[in-house]
Image (spheres, rainbow, N blue to C red):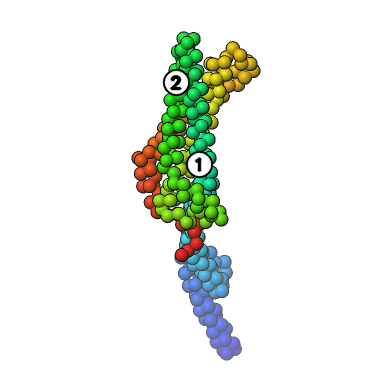
Amino acid sequence: MRLARDRDGYSEALQKTMNNKYALNSITVTGDGNAVGNGNTVTVVKEHHVHHHNNRNTGNGGKDNGDGDAGAALGGLLVIAIAMAALSYWFARYASLAYTVAYVVALLEGVIAFFAIAVSLHAEDYATAGRNSVILLLAAVLAYAVATAVGDYNPQLTELAKQASGFKDFWCHLNLYGQQLASRHALLASFFIAPSLLLLAPHAMRSALIDVAGHYTSTRLLAPLAKLSPNSTLIVAGFLCLVVAWGHSAMGGEFWAHQFVTRVTLLCPAP
């Protein structure tokens, strides 16, 4: 009987020791903000491990977000570089033709406006004469800017573009000055010269069909032309023409050179 009581006492002491041990582990994990249901040692270690693993993932997540932002920025720069190189290449191939057409159209619009001014003054329609004077002025500014651009554009760019296998080959063979010159002319021609000519065209047609030959023009044409040539488009065309004139001036070239300070080599193979 005594032996049985000693054995029972030993078992109770052992059980208390184990309970204290698990209770200690349970307190440690609770301090980390984790919940332990039954004080199981394996559960404690696992929860503690997951806690640190989550911290590690949070740090990596921030790093991944940073890498993603950098990748998006690099992708955006690559798209811009491709667009600029392709536009410069295609414009270089047809620069002479493009400038010739733009110059002739600008002169034609100016001549029409000049005759419309004469007719309006003869009819004492001074408001119409004033509007046609604005068209004549803008056409003259545009023609002057195109003539200046022709003298500034290097014909070697056209030769190089025709010899190149594609826009990438063309772009990567240009030095810094060549990229500056090719891109400036391509951007101004595509986004300023062409739109300004298109905006002035309905006004010139209106001057020719309404102001000059109004009595002989079908009324079906007069209303659409009037809608296509509001005075607001003259304001926009005036802004575009001024940008073209400034862009092809020495000041504009210097400004673009300060913005375009290094060669764009994202498309070019490493040397």
What's the residue type where badge 2 is placed? Ser
Dot 1 crowding, Cα within 10 Å, few <14, some 14–19, many 20+:
some
Residue picked out by circle 2: 133
Residue at (51, 63) in percent of width and height: 57
Where in the figure is residue 170, as x and y percent of width and height?
A: 51, 54
Q: Is residue 85 above or below residue 51?
A: above
The answer to whether residue 231 is seen in the rendering is no
Where in the figure is residue 260, as x and y percent of width and height?
A: 40, 49
Secondary element at tag 1: helix
Where in the figure is residue 102, as x and y percent of width and height?
A: 51, 34
Earlier residue among tags 1 and 2? 1
What's the residue type where badge 1 is placed? Ser
Residue picked out by circle 1: 96
The mark closer to the camera, 1 or 2, is 1
Given contact means CB atoms under 8 Å apart, are the residues at marks 1 and 2 in contact?
no
Quarter containing the N terminus: bottom right
As rendered, which of 18 and 106 lies closer to the eye?
106
As rendered, which of 84 and 38 lies closer to the eye?
84
Position of 248 with respect to 15 (left or right) is left
As rendered, which of 83 and 135 lies closer to the eye?
135
Residue at (47, 20) in percent of width and height: 114
Q: Is residue 39 above or below residue 226?
A: below
Tell me the CA gap for discs 1 and 2.
29 Å
